[in-house]
Amino acid sequence: MKTKILLKEAEMPTHWYNVVADMPNPPAAILAPDGSPVTPDALSAIFPDAIIEQEVSAERWIPIPEEVREVLTLWRPSPLYRAERLEQALNTPAKIYFKNEAVSPAGSHKPNTAVAQAFYNKQQGIKRLTTETGAGQWGCSIALAGQMFGLDVRVFMVKVSYGQKPYRRSMMQTWGAEVFPSATDMTQSGRHILEKHPDSAGSLGIAISEAVEEAAGRSDTNYALGSVLNHVILHQTIIGEEAKKQFEMIGEYPDMIFAPCGGGSNFGGVAFPFFADKASGKEVELVAVEPTSCPTLTKGVYAYDFGDTEGLTPLTKMYTLGHDFMPPGIHAGGLRYHGESALVSQLYNEGLLSAVAIPQLETFEAGVLFAKTQGIIPAPESCHGVAATIREAKRCAETGEPKTLLFNLSGHGHFDMSSYDRYFKGELEDFDYPDEAIQESLANLPKVG
C-alpha cells in the first residue's frame, strides 16, 4: 500500500475544468443593484479581460497559460496521502485519503488562483492589486504571486485575524505587500463601518468593500479575490483533477469527498472535477463543511445578495446570511463569510451537493488527532474537513462499510498555533449563531425584480 501517491511534473494538468459545462441548468445571472444583468464592461473597472471571460465562460476546459504552470511547478503536483495511521486510531474499515495543499510556499491551496490572477493582471498592464484576507492565507498567496510577476499588493486583513495571526502578516510583508487591519479609516467603506461599529472585529465582507473601493478608484489598480467567484474556483480545480489521476494510479475512487467551505473555492477545487463524473451517473457524495457559527449553506437562504458588506459588488444568487451579517471571531477566519459561491449555491439548491455544519471545538479535536496520527498540523479551516471525515469514518466503524473517503487538507496551521494554544487552555467555545440574529440580517437583503 502506498502512503504517498505522486504525479510527475509533466503530469500536472494543462487545463482547468469548468463545472458550468456539466451543470443541469445555466448559472443564475449576475445583476446590477437595479436588477439589470451586469455587463463585462461593468466588471472591467476591477478585473482584467481574461478573468472576466473566465467568469462567464461555459467552456468545459480552459487552458492554463505556460507562465502560470511554470510557477505552479514550484510545488505542484501536490501529493495525495493515504491516512492509514488515522484509520487505525479510529478503528475504521474506511480508507481515508487527503490531498495535501499545505505544500505550497504560502502553506495553502490559495496560490493556485493567486498566480493565475497575478499573471492575467500583469498581462493587461496593471501595476497594483488590492485584496481582502481573513485568516491571512489568501493575503500571503496574492503577496507571493504579486512578487512573482512584479505587482504591488495592498491587503485589507480582517481585524480579528490581524491580531490573531501576526506571523501571516509578517509573511505578506516579506513578499512585499502592505497590510492593514480592516475596517480602516483609509476608505469610505471602512469609515462608514467604524461609525456604526467602532469596536468592529471586521469581516471578509467589510474587507472586500474596502479593497473593491480602492481598486475601482485607480486606473493602475485591480482587485483580486480569493474565493467565491467562478474564475477563482476554476483555477482551484487543478486540485481535483490531480486527485482523480492519483486515484486512477492506485485503482481507487472516493465514495465521499469533504472540504471546508467558506466562499467555496477550496470545496469546489477538489469536488467539481468529480462532479463531472457524478453528472455522468457515477456515485460520489460531495460534502461542503462549514462552521456552526457561520452556517451559510445550512441556515442561510438562496437569494440575490451583495458579496460585500457595503453593497459595492454586483448581486449574485447565492446562499447568504445577509451581507451585513457580523460573524463571531472564531479562529477559522477564512470561513467567516456571509455568502457562498454562486456555483456551489446553485448545485446545493438543486440537491446535487451536501453540506454539514460542525462546531469549533469538534474541529480542533479532529485537528489534534490528525496531527498526532499523520504528523501534519492542519489550519483551523482545514480542521473542518478533517472533522467531517472523522465523523463518517466513525460511522463506517459502526456499520462496517468500507467506504473510501477523501478530504482536502487546504493548509497547514503553523501560523495558527495561538488558536491551538487557546484550545489547549480551554479558552475556545462553540457558538451556534442564533436563528433570530440570522433573520435580522436577512431582513436587509436587497430587493430584486
Image: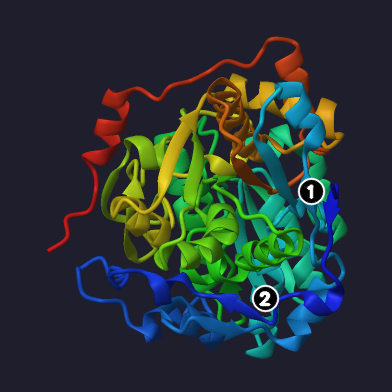
Give the image location of residue 176, x and y in percent.
83, 63
The amino acid type of the residue labelled 2 equals Ala
Left/right of residue 251 with respect to residue 25 in the rendered view = right
The amino acid type of the residue labelled 1 equals Tyr
Q: CA distance from mark 1 to mark 2?
A: 26 Å
Give the image location of residue 129, x and y in percent.
65, 71
> Residue drawn at (41%, 79%), measured in percent from left and top?
56
> Residue drawn at (36%, 69%), measured in percent from left and top?
23
Give the image quarter of residue 73. bottom right
Label 1: which residue? 81
Front residue of 343 and 195:
343
Left/right of residue 272 with respect to residue 81 in the rendered view = left
Give the image quarter of residue 114. bottom right
Front residue of 370 and 280:
280
Q: Which mark is residue 116?
A: 2
Residue placed furthest toward the top:
426
Give the image location of residue 413, x and y in percent.
78, 38
Front residue of 391 and 379:
391
Mark toward the start of the polypeptide (1 vs 2): 1
Q: Is residue 162 above or below residue 364?
A: below
The C terminus lies in which quarter of the figure? bottom left
Q: Secondary structure at mark 1?
A: strand
Give the image location of residue 85, x and y in percent.
82, 31
